[in-house]
Amino acid sequence: MRQLVLLFGLILLLHPAARAQHAFSTETLEKFQPTMGHYALRDGRQGEGEITFEPAVTPRVTIRLSDGKKVKFRPDEVVSFTLGECLFMPTNELAEHPTEANAARYHGYFVQVLDTGHLVLVRQYKPLSKAGASSTALLIRHSTDGHWTEIPMPFRGAPSSQSFRETLAPFLAGRDDLLEDLHDSKLTYRLVPAYVEAYNSGHELRVEEE
C-alpha cells in the first residue's frame, strides 16, 4: 500500500496533465482513440501498452499488457493510465476517505485529472444511461477532504448561475481576485480549470486566447 501511495504522488507531481488545461469543451463526450500509454495497476504491474477507453460505453479500460493480451480493468483494479497528455485515475484513488453520501455516487469511475494542489479538480465521464445519454461532470474537493462536490453547469450554456457561484465560492476563499470574477460572471464553467490552476499555484490568472 505504501508503494501505491508513493506512486500516486509521483504521478501527480511529474505528469503534465496534473496541471489544468485552460478551457475545455462541455458540449460533447470525447471519443478516445486506442493509443499507446502508460498504466499502473493495483497489483503492482505497470508499463506501456495500447490503451482503449470508451467512457460513453463502459467505465472499464482495456489495456494490452506486455504479454500481448488485451484485458479489461475495473476502476478499482487501476491506479492510473494515460492517453496522450491526459492522466486518468479512479475516484477511489483520489479520495482516501469518501463520505457515505459521496461513495456511491462518485466512486467506481475513471476521471481525468485536471489540476491538483490545495484543490483537486477532475472531470468525470459517465457512461450511456438507459435513456441513451452520456455526460461529463466537473468534481472538486479540498486535498484534505474526501468529499467530492459536483460543480453545477449553468442552464443552457449561460455563462454563470446562482448555484454555480454558490458552489464554487467556498473553494476560492482567500483569493479576492478570483472571487470577484466569479461574482461578475467572468469565471464561466468552461474556465473553471484555469481558475483552479491559478488558485493552486498562487499566481495570477492566465487564460490562453482561443
Image (cartoon, grey):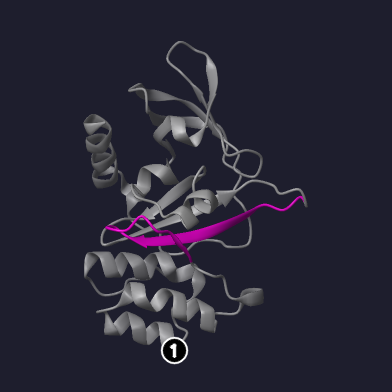
Between residues 94 and 57, which one lies in front from this camera angle?
94
Q: Residue at x 54, y 59 (%)?
A: 137
Point out the stretch of residues depicted in magenta.
Answer: 132-150
Q: Does residue 125 appear to the left or right of 148 in the view shown?
A: right
The image position of residue 171, as x and y in percent, is 34, 72
Q: Residue furthest top?
A: 67
Residue furthest to the front in view is 100
Q: Closer to the camera, 34 or 209?
A: 34
Looking at the image, residue 117 lies above or below residue 104 = below
Residue 189 position, x and y percent, is 50, 71
Going 32% across and 64% down the picture, which residue do you hit?
197
Q: Secondary structure at mark 1?
A: loop
Q: Give the tally of numbered discs.
A: 1
Q: Position of residue 105 (x, y in %)?
A: 54, 53
**Residue 34 visible from this viewpoint:** yes
From what the image shows, is residue 94 above or below residue 41?
A: below
Q: Is residue 210 visible?
A: no
With 200 as the anchor, is 88 left or right in this view?
right
Mark 1 residue type:
Asp
- Residue 201 lies, in percent from the top left, at 23, 65
Q: Is residue 50 magenta?
A: no
Does the magenta-highlighted stretch encompass residue 147? yes
Packing grade of label 1 (10 A; few <14, some 14-19, many >=20) is: few
Residue occupied by mark 1? 184
Q: Is residue 64 left or right of residue 98?
A: right
Quarter where residue 167 is shown: bottom left
What is the quadrant of the N terminus in the image? top left
Above or below — where is 72 with respect to 207? Answer: above
Residue at image location 36% in from the left, 71% down from the top: 195
